[in-house]
Amino acid sequence: MKLKKFLIFTFIIINFIYINQSYSIEPDVFVQSTVNRASEALNNKYSKEEKIEKLKQIASETVDIKGIGYYTLGAYRKNMSENEINQYEILFEQYFLKSFSSRLAEYSNPEIEVVSKKELNKNYTMVSSVLVGTEQRPEVKIDWRIYKKKPENPLIRDLIIEGLSLARTQKEEFSSIIQSNDGDMNALFSTLKEFIK
Amino acid sequence: MLATNVSAGTDGENSLSKKNSGEVKDCFEGVNRATFKLNQVLDGVIFEPIAKAYRVLPSPVRNGTSNALDNLSTLVTIPNNILQGEFKRAGVNTGRFIVNTTVGVVGIFDVAKKIGFTEYEKEDYGQTLGVMGIGPGCYVVLPVLGPSTIRDTAGSFANILGGDAWYNVTIANDTKHFSDFDYYSSRASSGIDFRAKNIYSFENLEKNSIDFYASVRSLYLQDRQQKIANSNAITETQDDSDWEEIETQ
């Protein structure tokens, strides 16, 4: 009886480990699959509006919008009420999706190749890729900060284009708005609302 | 729930250090923003239309112009390689300059690249001062020339104090082979070439920024940080600490 219980327990544990391993996604595979989806969305057979909708869908599934939103706020989060944080989360998601899709929708059939990856720590891997150059534009290096605390559901937290971090740029932009309005978060909310319109 | 998952990071001020703790102050923000606006007007009226016209030129003409301007810039890069103790790079760039100026017809053709020279990376006196450990000082926006820092502006004076061989043979000394016009037209062409290469990036950035001035400042300072570090490894210039404390999974 004891042996039977032991075997059943072992079987469950092995299956659990196997399931976890089989569902974990390597960050480089995740990035390549995401850029392939984005490339398809940017195919010229779609109108600009269709491209934007498809990009928004991809971003919702693959980007840690909430995490980027927190990062972007920096130290100002400390002084915000829960209500303000909730309001910010809603506004930031709309702002991010509009800004992200609008930036990318300008590209047509981009070809991105993943070239390497480097594990920074247990939560982060940096995946390096290149946007293949064309007659109109030179090759561009793009690095992806992948948050992989849940290996089965990796998420993008930052794009670093030729060494320039989009998240950091956004953080400094938000900070500038808050600072120039004497720390009034409502000024940031108004600016975000204006952008989302 | 939020209180347990979220703790605050830095305040988002700019810095050239890896830990962005606000070392680069925008001490003259009011004046800088006004100058930035002036530059935007000048750009809209003069530089952008010229850059757009320049983009209409055939690709070989644009590439040739860009190559020739890069070749001239090696005259500033080489002394900076030496000042930074990068003697091997100085040697490679000297070889590049000789090959491209002769076989490459005054630099129009980047023959050095074709025969296997490493990718060219520009260096300037501002970067050298940074490598020597001199801090950036305040962020400034210069009329026409755009974003800079006190250190980078001071560094650029080295060009007209004998640090740029091209300036020396065109303006500082009467060599009878070159004139002031050659120098100023090459500098103007560099600006137009840069603007033309980035025309859609700027348009896109401006359209999608909620504070375009702050975006440009951030990008300029990040770019300088990257160049001073002389590193292509992204992990060496990115600060991870602010990310570590954000838990969403």
Image (cartoon, rainbow, N blue to C red):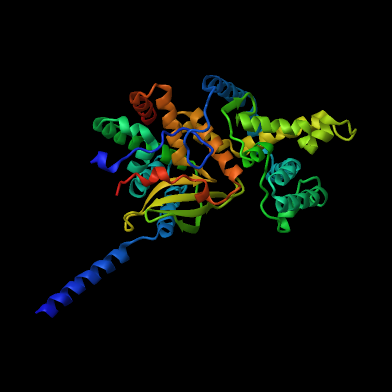
Residue A150, image quadrant: bottom left
Q: Tell me which residue sits at (40%, 39%) in the image.
A: A49
- Left or right of B186? Residue A129 is left
Q: Is residue A121 visible?
A: yes
- Left or right of B187? Residue A73 is left
Residue B118, image quadrant: bottom right
- Whole-percent x and y of residue B37? 55, 22
Q: Tell me which residue sits at (30%, 46%) in the image.
A: B248
Q: Which residue reaches farthest front?
A: B133
Q: Which residue reaches farthest left?
A: A1
| B7 vs A151: above or below | above
Q: Is residue A55 visible?
A: no
- Whole-percent x and y of residue A109? 49, 50
- Whole-percent x and y of residue A61? 33, 49
| A114 vs A7: above or below | above
- Left or right of B102? Residue A3 is left
Quadrant assignment for the N terminus of chain A: bottom left
Q: Which residue reaches farthest right?
A: B176
Q: Nearer the viewer, residue A164 or A42?
A: A164
Residue B185, image quadrant: top right
- Whole-percent x and y of residue B192? 67, 34
Q: Nearer the viewer, residue B207 or B136?
A: B136
